[in-house]
Image (cartoon, rainbow, N blue to C red):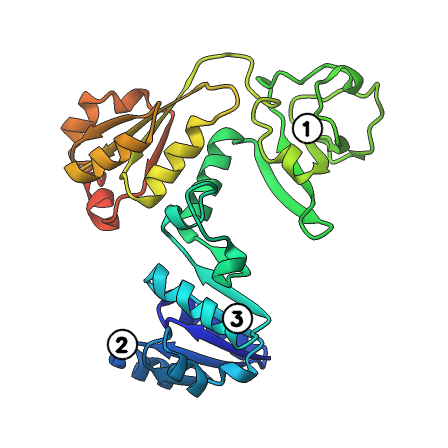
Amino acid sequence: MHIIILGGGGVGSTLATLLSNENQDVVIIEKDPDLARRLNEEIDGLVKCGNGASAVMLEEAGIKNAEMLIAVTEVDEVNMIACMLAKKYNVPITVARVRNPEYYHEGSSILSNEQLGIDIIINPERVASFEIAKIIRTPNVRETEYFAKGQIKMVSIFIDEHTKLINQPLFELPIPKNSIVAAIERKSGVFIVPGGNDIILPGDKVFLLGKRGVLDDISWLFQKKESRNLNVLILGGGRIGFQLAELLEFNRKNNINVKIIEKDADCCQNVAAKLNKTLILQGDATDLTFLKQEDIQNTDVLVAVTGDNFSFRSSFLPG
């Protein structure tokens, strides 16, 4: 398969390495000359230096014979234009990294993905925010598997003594429609296929099987007995922080209090204008005095997604 990759950064170079190891014919287009030279030495594939949104450059990379184009440059617009051009050359599969939510939110985009020539949109920040939100909403979920091309989902959930579902027969439980308790693994290691009269015990590992949409948010089903709200503190109001807060605002039971601490004043104003239930505070996430003033000791979940990994980590080191 002839595959063209736009962007030689971390994602692009990793993809090129993986695909080359699978004996795929890979061409990377990278705009930075120094990076292009380094990639040429490190990757088993053709590396071209130039603008990936140029039809001339794409033709040099063999776009007429390409079976896939993956656009993962740092610029959304370049990725989108490259995919549009690729479809003009009848490339069967186009993938674009698009980070700006204005380009893919329903109702906010004039052009559809089909009109943009994009078959698959990837957004690392969006994926990260979804995964963090899933952990916050369903901390007991241990494993997730997909079947039938992603339409069927199976999750395994650890049941502790505080879960509402314990010591009740399955037929009395509010299991969502189009889903079943497929299996229960006891603490002893016994694996059973349950019937309606079986009960869930503390320490069980429960396997739930159902349609993907039904099981996407099952936090309400496995809530703890206590009804105290969960306090979530997000350090950083960038793409991940904002999108995480946005997801948590739509929590089914509305039992999550969200607070964002962001250093940049303009970012604070931008995020505050888009969120309805999240408290936005301007401050330095590395300032322990400030964090204590904001009652960090009573925070249940802290999510650090600032742009500076080291400064935040060092502020919490002993001494």
Q: Quadrant of the N terminus?
A: bottom right
Disc 1 to disc 2, how far (Cα)?
54 Å
Q: Nearer the viewer, mark 1 or mark 2?
A: 2
Q: Nearer the viewer, mark 2 or mark 3?
A: 3
Q: Which residue is mark 3?
A: 87
Q: Amino acid at mark 1?
A: Asp
Tell me if 76 is positioned left or right of 217 in this view. left
Q: Mark 2 Cα within 10 Å, few/some/many (few <14, many 20+)?
A: some
Is label 3 in a helix, a strand or a loop?
Answer: helix
Q: Is residue 263 above or below residue 171?
A: below
Disc 1 to disc 3, how far (Cα)?
51 Å
**Which residue is at 51% across, 59% downward?**
115
Q: Mark 1 Cα within 10 Å, few/some/many (few <14, many 20+)?
A: many
Q: Quadrant of residue 175?
A: top right
**Which residue is at 60% across, 28% downward?**
218
Is label 2 in a helix, a strand or a loop?
Answer: loop
Q: Amino acid at mark 2?
A: Asp
Q: Which residue is mark 1?
A: 204
Q: Is residue 31 above or below residue 284?
A: below
Q: Is residue 287 above or below residue 26?
A: above
Q: Quadrant of the C terminus?
A: top left
Instruction: Give coordinates of residue 167: x percent, y percent.
Output: 71, 15
Tell me if 24 is positioned left or right of 28 in this view. right
Label of residue 32 in the image: 2
Q: Amino acid at mark 3?
A: Lys
Instruction: Give coordinates of residue 19: x percent, y percent.
Output: 53, 75
Instruction: Give coordinates of residue 140: x percent, y percent.
Output: 56, 31
Instruction: Give coordinates of residue 124: x percent, y percent.
Output: 42, 53
Disc 2 to disc 3, how far (Cα)?
25 Å
